[in-house]
Image: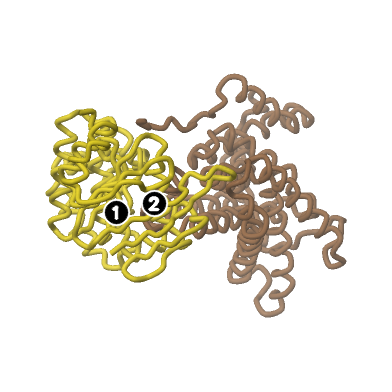
Chain colours: A yellow, B brown
C-alpha cells in the first residue's frame, strides 16, 4: 500500500531524515521504533504532507505522492494522528469530529462514522458537547483517533499514541488500534513504547538518527538482541 | 455630566462605534487566523468608500437617485473592493511570507498600506485631494424624545448589526466557520482534517476586507468627504478597539469598538482635542492593565 524509498527530509541545514526506506503492506500493522530524535515523527509528517521531502519517493496505492499537500492526501486516504494529539481545544468534541469529515461529501456517512467512534469510545460520546481542551490526556487521544476514523483513510498513521498515558489507557488504546486494523485499515505506528508496539505489529523497522537500520517481521525484531538491549531494556 | 452624556451623544457614539466595529472585525479575524496585525486594513476601508463613490456615479443614471436598489449596489461595490483588495494583498504580499518570521509580514503590512495610499493618490482618477461623497440615500431627521436621530444613524447601526449577525452565524454554524476556528487554533491539525488552510485564510481576508469596505461606505455617507488617507485614523482606532476587546476575539472586537465610539464621542463633547486623543489613552491603559483585552482568549489548552 505504501512504499517509501530513500526518503530525505531537511529542516534548513539540518537533515533530520537521511535515508529512510520501508514498506507498509495493505491490511497490516507496521511499526517504526526508535529513540527520541531518530526521525520517527518527521517521517510521518513527510508521509502525510506536513513536511516536504528533499529527496526520495513516497508511493501510496501505486501513486507517487512525494511533495503533495497534506489536505489533498487526506482525500486520497491517509489519516494521520499527530504527535501531541492536536485536537482543537476551543471546538467541542462533536465539532472536532465533524471537521474530520471535511473531505467527505456525504454528510450521512460522516454521521455514521461518528456513531462508530461513539460506539468505540463511549467516553468520547459522553463528552460530545464539551470543549476539546477540557478533556483529559487519554480522552484527547481517543478523540484524536476518533477523528482519524471519521477522516476514513485506508492508511492510518499513528504518532506515539501511548505518550503520557496511564498504563491502563495504553492497553485500551492499543486494543482499539488492533480493532481498527481488523476492520480493514492499514496501520503505520510510531512508538517509543517498543514492547507494546512490537506485540501488535506484523512488521517492524528500527529508525536510528535518520536511517532505517534493522527491519523484519515484528516477532523476529522483538527477539533481535540489538533491539532487546537498546529498545526493550532487557 | 448631563450635557456630555445624553441620549444624543450615546446615539452618536453608537454610530461611530458601528463603523469602528466593522473595521475592527477584520483586524481581529485576520489576527486570529494568521497572527498578523494587518496595518493595511484601514486602507480597505478607504477603497470601499472610493468603490462606493464610483459605483454611485456609474449606476445613478440607471436607477433612481436615493433608491434602495442603488444603495444596495453601492454597498456591494464597497464590499467587493474592500474584500477583493484584501484577498489580493494576502495572495501577493502575505502568503509568500506566511512561515517566515512574523516581523517580515508586519513590515510588509505597513508597506502594503503605504502602497495603497500613495498608489491611489497618484492615480489621476482618484488623486490626493478630498472628494465630496454623494448623498446615496436622502437624509431625514427622526425625532426621538428630546433627541433627533438621522436616518443615517439607523442605517449605520442596521447595516453593522446585519453584517455582524451574519458573521456570527457564519463562524458559529457554518462549516467554513468551523474550519476558520480550526485553522486559527492549529494549522497542521486543520491540514490533517483535509482543510485547505490557504483557502480558509483567503476567505478570512475576503470577509474582513469586505466588512472594512462596507464601513467605508457608511463612513462616506455619514461624513461625506473621502480622500486616500481617510483609512489611517479609523484604521488605527479600530485596531485599538480590537486590542481593547481582546485581539483575535470576535465579540471582543465589537465590544471594544462600541466602547471606543462612546468614549470618543463623550470626550469630544467635553473637548474636541480630548476626543482625538482618548483612543490612545485607552490603548496605553489596556496595555498596562490588561494586555489581553476585555474578552482576551483564555484558551483551555492541555499540553
Q: Residue furthest bottom?
A: B62
Label 1: how many Cα within 10 Å (few below 14, some 14–19, many 20+): many
The residue shown at (25%, 43%) is: A143
> Residue B47, position in %: x, y?
71, 58
Q: Circle 2 sits on which residue?
A: B178
Label 2: how many Cα within 10 Å (few below 14, some 14–19, many 20+): some
Instruction: Give the Cα separation between the discs numbered 2 and 1.
Output: 9 Å
Residue B9 makes an appearance in the image? no
> Residue A230, position in %: x, y?
29, 32
Residue A90 image-quadrant placement: top left
Q: Which of B143/A191 is in front?
A: A191
The residue shown at (26%, 37%) is: A227
Q: Is residue A119 left or right of residue B216?
A: left
> Residue B92, position in %: x, y?
66, 59
Q: Is residue B277 left or right of residue B175?
A: right
SS type, badge 2:
helix
Q: Is residue B22 above or below residue A133?
A: below
The chain identifier of the residue carrying mark 1 reads A
Residue A98 disc label: 1
Task: Quarter of the image for the N terminus of chain A: give it.
Answer: bottom left
Q: Which of B15/A142 is in front?
A: A142
Q: Which of B259/B181 is in front?
A: B181
Residue A82 image-quadrant placement: top left
Residue B60 makes an appearance in the image? yes
Q: Are marks 2 and 1 on the same chain?
A: no
Task: Quarter of the image for the C terminus of chain A: give it.
Answer: top left
User: Marks 1 and 2: in contact by CB < 8 Å?
Assistant: yes
Amino acid at each position: 500500500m505504501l512504499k517509501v524509498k530513500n526518503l530525505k527530509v531537511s529542516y534548513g541545514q539540518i537533515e533530520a531524515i537521511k535515508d529512510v526506506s520501508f514498506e507498509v503492506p495493505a491490511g497490516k500493522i507496521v511499526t517504526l521504533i526508535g529513540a527520541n530524535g531518530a526521525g520517527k515523527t518527521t517521517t510521518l509528517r513527510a508521509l502525510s504532507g506536513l513536511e516536504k521531502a528533499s529527496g526520495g519517493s513516497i508511493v501510496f496505492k501505486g501513486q507517487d505522492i512525494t511533495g503533495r499537500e497534506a489536505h489533498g492526501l487526506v482525500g486520497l486516504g491517509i489519516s494521520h494522528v499527530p504527535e501531541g494529539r492536536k485536537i482543537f481545544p476551543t471546538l467541542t468534541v462533536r465539532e472536532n469530529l465533524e471537521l474530520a469529515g471535511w473531505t467527505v461529501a456525504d454528510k450521512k456517512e460522516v454521521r455514521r462514522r461518528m456513531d462508530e467512534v461513539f460506539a468505540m469510545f463511549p467516553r468520547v460520546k459522553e463528552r460530545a458537547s464539551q470543549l476539546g481542551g477540557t478533556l483529559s490526556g487519554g480522552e484527547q487521544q481517543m478523540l484524536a483517533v476518533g477523528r482519524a476514523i471519521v477522516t476514513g483513510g485506508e492508511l492510518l498513521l499513528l504518532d506515539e499514541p501511548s505518550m503520557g498515558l496511564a498504563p491502563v489507557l495504553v492497553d485500551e488504546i492499543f486494543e482499539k488500534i488492533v480493532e481498527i486494523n481488523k476492520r480493514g485499515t492499514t496501520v503505520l505506528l510510531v512508538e517509543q513504547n517498543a514492547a507494546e508496539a512490537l506485540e501488535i505489529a506484523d512488521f517492524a523497522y528500527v529508525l536510528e538518527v535518520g536511517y532505517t537500520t534493522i527491519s523484519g517481521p515484528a516477532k523476529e525484531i522483538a527477539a533481535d538482541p540489538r533491539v532487546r538491549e537498546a529498545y526493550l531494556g532487557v | 455630566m448631563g450635557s456630555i452624556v445624553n441620549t444624543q451623544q450615546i446615539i452618536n457614539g453608537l454610530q461611530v462605534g458601528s463603523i469602528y466595529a466593522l473595521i475592527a472585525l477584520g483586524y481581529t479575524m485576520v489576527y486570529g487566523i494568521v497572527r498578523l496585525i494587518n496595518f493595511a486594513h484601514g486602507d480597505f476601508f478607504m477603497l470601499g468608500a472610493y468603490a462606493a463613490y464610483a459605483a454611485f456615479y456609474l449606476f445613478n443614471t440607471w436607477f433612481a437617485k436615493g433608491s434602495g436598489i442603488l444603495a444596495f449596489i453601492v454597498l456591494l461595490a464597497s464590499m467587493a473592493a474592500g474584500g477583493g483588495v484584501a484577498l489580493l494583498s494576502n495572495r501577493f504580499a502575505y502568503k509568500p511570507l506566511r512561515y517566515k518570521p512574523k516581523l517580515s509580514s508586519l513590515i510588509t503590512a505597513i508597506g502594503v498600506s503605504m502602497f495603497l495610499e500613495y498608489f491611489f493618490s497618484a492615480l489621476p482618477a482618484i488623486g490626493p485631494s478630498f472628494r465630496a461623497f454623494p448623498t446615496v440615500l436622502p437624509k431625514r431627521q427622526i425625532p426621538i424624545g428630546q433627541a433627533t436621530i438621522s436616518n443615517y444613524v439607523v442605517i449605520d447601526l442596521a447595516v453593522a448589526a446585519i453584517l455582524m449577525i451574519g458573521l456570527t452565524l457564519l463562524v458559529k454554524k457554518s462549516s467554513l466557520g468551523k474550519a476558520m476556528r480550526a485553522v486559527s487554533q492549529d494549522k497542521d491539525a486543520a491540514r490533517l482534517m483535509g482543510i485547505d488552510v490557504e483557502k480558509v485564510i483567503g476567505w478570512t481576508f475576503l470577509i474582513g476586507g469586505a466588512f472594512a469596505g462596507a464601513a467605508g461606505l457608511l463612513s462616506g455617507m455619514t461624513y461625506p468627504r473621502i480622500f486616500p488617507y481617510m483609512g489611517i485614523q479609523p484604521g488605527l482606532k479600530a485596531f485599538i478597539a480590537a486590542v481593547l476587546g481582546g485581539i483575535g476575539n470576535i465579540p471582543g472586537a465589537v465590544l471594544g469598538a462600541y466602547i471606543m465610539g462612546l468614549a470618543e464621542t463623550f470626550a469630544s463633547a467635553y473637548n474636541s482635542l480630548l476626543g482625538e486623543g482618548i483612543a490612545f489613552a485607552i490603548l496605553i491603559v489596556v496595555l498596562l492593565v490588561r494586555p489581553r483585552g476585555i474578552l482576551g482568549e483564555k484558551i483551555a489548552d492541555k499540553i
